Structures are given as structure tokens and as C-alpha cells.
Amino acid sequence: MSELRSIPLGDACEVVVGQLPRELVPDAEGFQALWELHPSEFHEIMIHGRQVPTPRWQQAYGADYHYTGRVNRALPLVAPMEAWLAWARETFDVRLNGLLLNWYDGTVGHYIGKHRDSDVHRVEGSPIVTLSFGEDRAFRMRPWRGEGFTDIPAVNGGVIVISWTTNRAFTHEVPASARARGRRISVTLRAFDT
């Protein structure tokens, strides 16, 4: 892996970025195989008291993910996911055990709005580790209830790490972009109580 570097956000918070080892970055065939895993339906989330479909496909693997009043039921890990999880445990936190994949199709405007990750069933103090594959997109950090933002490039094979403290103090998002015309897959690893 390339050297990790810190991007300061203010209020003693930061985002840590780096690159996955080359052998863990899917080639074109591996990316296509991963792309084909996306569900046929959009997951529904609760926003302002009503259920709405997410503007991207998503699926939990390894551990259920509880958020917005819903549960994304986990499927078993497949081989590449096991390798990413083993690497992230060794590099960041041995407690990581759940993956959430998001599939973004730029041709139909997929994005994820600003949010803080739910702490429900998460192991206190554990980081959020995001791996990016495919098209480069902006990963935007905003102060919770504050102004301004910092865009971090989410590049193919890139790693973005948000600490527990940073997740409480900042939102993150992958904003809609008229220039995004390709496909991106994010793999977010978290530590959940089992």
C-alpha cells in the first residue's frame, strides 16, 4: 500500500487517504464481475418518516447494517471481499467485520447524500474504511451543522478512512455530478457487534 496521509478538516478531525496494494485492485474483468453483483432493486431507506429508494444500488456483506430505521441484511462474503477485509483488519482495525457495497452508475445520476454513518451496532471507536473502484468521484466532507466542505478525490484503488470522532463531527457524501458518466463501486468496511 502507498503511504497513508492525513487531510486535516479542522476541529482536530482528519481523513486518512492512501492506495490499496495493486494486487487487491480489480482489473477490468474483476470490476465487471463485481458490478454484476449489484441487486436488481434499490434498497429503501427511511427519510423524514417515509421510505424512499436509494439513488444507487447497495448490499451488505458479512454483517447486517442497521441505519435509517432499516436493516440491510448481509449476504456471505465472496473471495475478493475476504481479501479486502483481511487487508483492512491488518492495516486499520482487527474488529472490522462488515462490508457495504454501493454501485454508482453515472449515466443515471447515482449519488449518496450528506450523512453521518449510524453508530447502531457499530463497535465504539472503530473507523469507517472506504475502498473505491472505477470512475473517480468527489468524496465530500462537511462540518456537521457547519458551513463549507472539503472534496477528497475517490480514485480507483483509493482508500479513505474516517475515524469515529470525525464521523461524529462531519458528514460525508458522493454528490451528484453531471460530469460523472462512468461506473463506480465503493466498498465500505465497518466493525459491528455480533
Image (tube, rainbow, N blue to C red):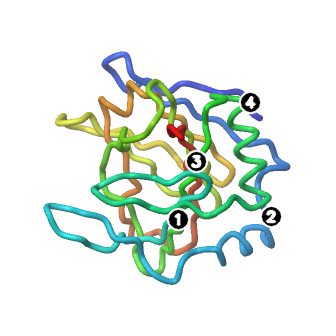
**Residue 170: x %, y % from top left:** 31, 34
Residue contact at pointers 1 and 2, CB within 8 angstroms: no
User: Mark 3 and mark 1: span between their CA atoms?
Assistant: 11 Å
Percent position of residue 83, x then y: 78, 48
Q: Which mark is residue 98?
A: 3
User: Which residue is drawn at the image coordinates 60% and 26% (left, top)?
Assistant: 5
Tally the numbered discs. Answer: 4
Q: Residue furthest bottom?
A: 40
The mark that comes first in sequence, 1 or 2, is 2
Q: Nearer the viewer, mark 1 or mark 2?
A: 1
Residue 140, compared with residue 183, is above or below; it is above
Residue 3: image x %, image y %? 71, 27
Q: The C terminus is located in which quarter?
A: top right
Looking at the rendered image, the disc whose residue lies closer to the viewer, 4 or 2, is 4
Q: Which residue bears the numbered disc 4?
A: 90
Alpha carbon separation for disc pair 1 and 2: 21 Å
Q: Is residue 155 left or right of residue 48?
A: right
Return the disc, 3 or 4, that comes first in the chain's sequence: 4
Q: Position of residue 50 (x, y in %)?
A: 17, 69
Q: Horizontally, is 60 left or right of 151 in the view?
A: right
Q: Amino acid at mark 1?
A: Gln
Please give the residue where the numbered disc 2 appears in the rendered image.
27
Q: CA distance from mark 4 to mark 1?
A: 24 Å
Query: In the rendered image, which residue does mark 1 sit on?
Result: 59
How far apart are the two marked residues, 4 and 2, measured between alpha carbons? 23 Å
